Image (tube, rainbow, N blue to C red):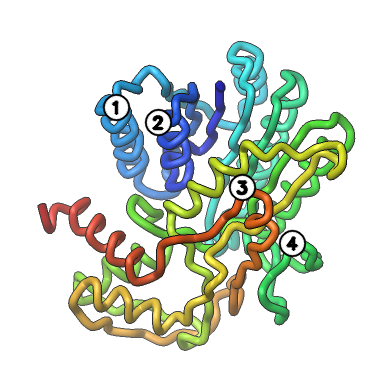
Amino acid sequence: MKFLVTGVAGFIGSRVAEELALQGHKVVGLDNLNDYYDPKLKLARLERIEKLLAQHNAEDNFRFIKMDLADRDGIAKLFADEQFQRVIHLAAQAGVRYSIDNPMAYVDSNLVGMMTILEGCRHNKVEHLVYASSSSVYGNQDKVPFSEDDRVDHPISLYAATKKANELMAHTYSHLYKLPTTGLRFFTVYGPWGRPDMAPWLFTKAIIAGSPIKVFNHGKLMRDFTYIDDIVAGVTGIQNALPTAQSAYYALFNIGNNKPVNLADFIASIETAVGKQAQKEYLPMQPGDVYQTYADTERLDKAISFKPKVNLTEGIQNFVHWFKSYYGEIS
């Protein structure tokens, strides 16, 4: 089939595009290569895709296009010219804390961008739109694990609000135009080639350098860390499970590890992998952060037999090994 994958130079998008291309699908990858973090990492991910596909004689299965989702005319023309069968929309302005100081970036990317994708799918008879939501929509609720049936009316960051808005926008298009849409609420994804603004990268870099790490809420946080390979398996699996009229052409799933980890244990895993103790700077809670995340993944398991396979110890070891390789500290 022919896929559009947005955010293809990103952490999850690059791996999803790579897997689909290896499976024999034709993939057009879209990204604006913005400077939210170092574009060199994004370009390195694209280079990795090209090298891997070349090794498998599958380089013709992938094309990259640089374009901004807010380019309404450009996106409309892309859909009309390419006639995608399926779309996996992973592009977004990420980061809870960044949204506090840069709100308009989230409007342009997460709201306008979602609308251009929905319109492209609507007017070109796309079979299935899979899009990224986030565990942040659950806010600071006490009930765990978080279920897709829980109310999510109290987002505590603009990032979370835009992700909830994306779910509502998709629901409307599914209802009005019988467009099959599936939202995936991601829970703290980590692993090799991850984002530099997330805890695994920040902590690993600081511990190796002997610099203090910032431990918010004095370490009293729980996160449902989910390894990238498990996420990719879930995304590529669910794209084949099209919502039908029975579900109003709309579906929504948590995609997480279903095993929350205390922040102290997470830091200990990195210390073990690095072979060095962390210097900790304990700080109060950050605005927009939540105290815990914990995914109920029963619905996704029923849909595609989703069962995460990589535990935290193995995942952190893989990440630290990649991190040192990326910075040239090991061969």
Mark nearest the camera among 3 and 1 is 1
Number of other residues with Cα within 10 Å of mark 3, as a class: few under 14, some 14 to 19, many 20 or more:
some
* Label 1–label 2 contact, CB within 8 A: yes
Q: Is residue 19 above or below residue 82?
A: below
Is residue 208 left or right of 243 when viewed as pictured?
left
Q: Is residue 159 visible?
A: no
Q: Which residue is mark 2?
A: 22
Mark toward the viewer: 1 or 4: 1
Give whichever of 155, 192 is nearer the camera. 192
Give the mark nearer the N terminus: 3 vs 2. Answer: 2
Q: CA distance from mark 1 to mark 2?
A: 8 Å
Q: Which residue is mark 1?
A: 56
Q: Left or right: where does residue 228 sit relative to residue 75?
A: left
Q: Residue at x 42, y 43 (%)?
A: 35
How far separated are the C-alphas under marks 3 and 4?
Answer: 14 Å
Q: Nearer the viewer, mark 4 or mark 2?
A: 2
Q: Alpha-carbon neighbours of circle 2 within 10 Å: few (<14), some, or many (≥20)?
A: many
Q: Earlier in the sequence, mark 3 or mark 1?
A: 1
Residue 48 image point, x, y percent = 29, 36
